[in-house]
Amino acid sequence: MIRTTDRTALDQWYCIDDLDDIGSAPRRTHLLGQEIVVRRDADGAVRVNEIATDGSVGAASPVEKRYGYAWTTLGAPARDILAIPESHEPDRKSVKCGAVTVHASGLRIVENFLDMAHFPYVHAEILGSERDPEVRHYHAEIRREVDEVWATGCKFFQPQASAAATGGVMVDYAYRVASPFVVLLYKTCVVAADRSDVICLFVQPMDEDLCRAHPVMFLIDDAAPQATLIQFQQLIFLQDRIILENQRPRLLPLEPRAEIPTRADISSVAYRRWLKEKGLLFGTAEGAREL
Amino acid sequence: MTRPSTITLYDFEISASCYKVRLLLSLLGLDYARVAVNFYPGFEHRQPAFREINPLGQLLVLRDGDLTLRDAQAILTYLARKYDPAARWLPSEPTLFGEVMMWLFFAASELSAATAARLHDILAFPVDEASAKTAARRAFRIMDDAMTGREHDGVSWFVGEAPTLADVALFPSIALSRDFGVEHDEYPALRRWMRRVRGLDRFIAMPGIPEHP
């Protein structure tokens, strides 16, 4: 792997590991083509270092701890790690679902997360049903004041919307892309109708076409055991994984005419436009052409 | 329609071994209870509480009344003996029985490389990726050659004239091989056989395995 020179990608914060998994034994992984090592030192502080091309431990990278994860950057981010106010609500359960490696561009993972049209087919009888496959009209926009992509007013019929669901319901969704590789959704909570469950996907782009996804949920659900909640999300994610790994091209094209969007894809259109405006290259088909 | 039973499966949804047992339970039409085990990221199977159930600290455990069984292949044979009185899935005729057992041991030994390769690629488990994938491909090649021979002899299943535990035990690893980058094009006989397995009455899938051919 080769460390990227893409400034836009470098100047971001990335989730790289679950704090519970970081011990004194060094854990090697990759970020943007750069090999890095994560470990806890004798004082319990989390350290991240680059691994030089000769294999020696190189420069230290900044470390932040948020939402139960270690975050780092290889550049100079202009913005802080995203805020998730709901995560601090005392009656919410934080459910970390374990990192899953996917041989695809991290941007494809984010885009798949935004897509509702695949629910009835990829997540049949769970997140969608062929009896009601319609993606109803919703709104997508780039919110300039916060520099995020939002899709709101999304509605979808779901036979089993979550581990806690006992029957089909019409679910309200809102999606938020907080940075190119960080995406969240807010979804009707089946046990508290006036509040939303929050499901986040922190993507760690390891290489152009390889990433780890760190899914974490902030749920209002005091009934289901943690293992059941985790398995529900892992089941969903593995259904996506096989599709994502077989998508071609592996890298995300940002050129408007490269792939044909439908009305259901307006969130993806906004996301791609936003990435293009930022000049992001890592994980894109356009970036690959410049290699 | 499923039959009620006293069975409890300690289950991890995305495990190929757990799926193997769920598949047989479904084929036998058995209803059962599930206990979700936080295999990953929690590694609950290595905790003291779980070691009381399985001292090996390994995931797959099935309980039936007072019986506690570990190991996917042992569980398959137990379920077949107990809940398939016609002995369709585990024939008692010595030759057929021997051949089924041969493939069950193959599934437990040679195909463990496929499990390791899959855990590496999906969950970044620390395994020797290259040797696991080479060993998995070698095992699939042996299966494909065997199935090519079976088809040449005019039969559709690994043992005998009808599906047996051999087919159940061999199916998950190859069906899930795309999870670790092994495409099915290299194994044409296995592709045709997998289509037949998917067509079985009460067949169930899991993520990574299409329900319909």
Image (cartoon, coloured by chain):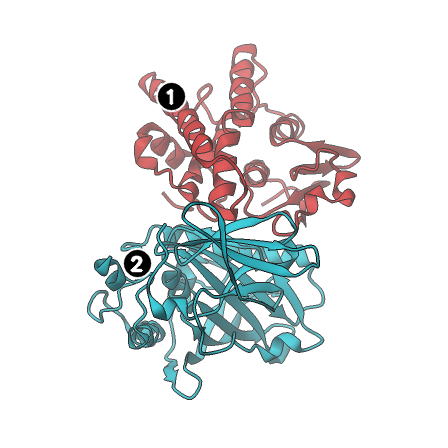
Q: How far across and down, in percent of the image, does residue A215 sit?
A: 53, 61
The chain displayed cyan equals: A
**Mark 1 surroundings within 10 Å by alpha-carbon count, few (fewer than 14), some (14 through 19), many (20 or more):** some
Residue projecting furthest to the left: A257
The crowd level at tag 2 (other Cα within 10 Å; few <14, some 14-19, many 20+) is many
Q: Nearer the viewer, residue B116 or B86?
A: B116
Q: Is label 1 on the same chain as label 2?
A: no
- In the image, what residue type sits under mark 1? Val
Q: Residue under mark 2: which chain is it in?
A: A
Quarter where residue B45 is shown:
top right
**Image x and y of residue A84, in percent:** 57, 77
Q: Is residue A225 visible?
A: yes
User: In the rendered image, which quarter contains the C terminus of chain B?
Assistant: top left
Image check: B208 left or right of B83?
left
Instruction: From the top left corner, tell me how far across and down residue A98 is, in percent.
Output: 57, 55
Disc 2, SS? loop
Q: What residue is disc 1 on? A: B155
Judging by the rendered image, the residue that carries numbered circle 2 is A251
Q: Nearer the viewer, residue A97 or A186?
A: A97
Chain ID, red in image: B
Q: Of B12 and B97, which appears nearest the observer?
A: B12
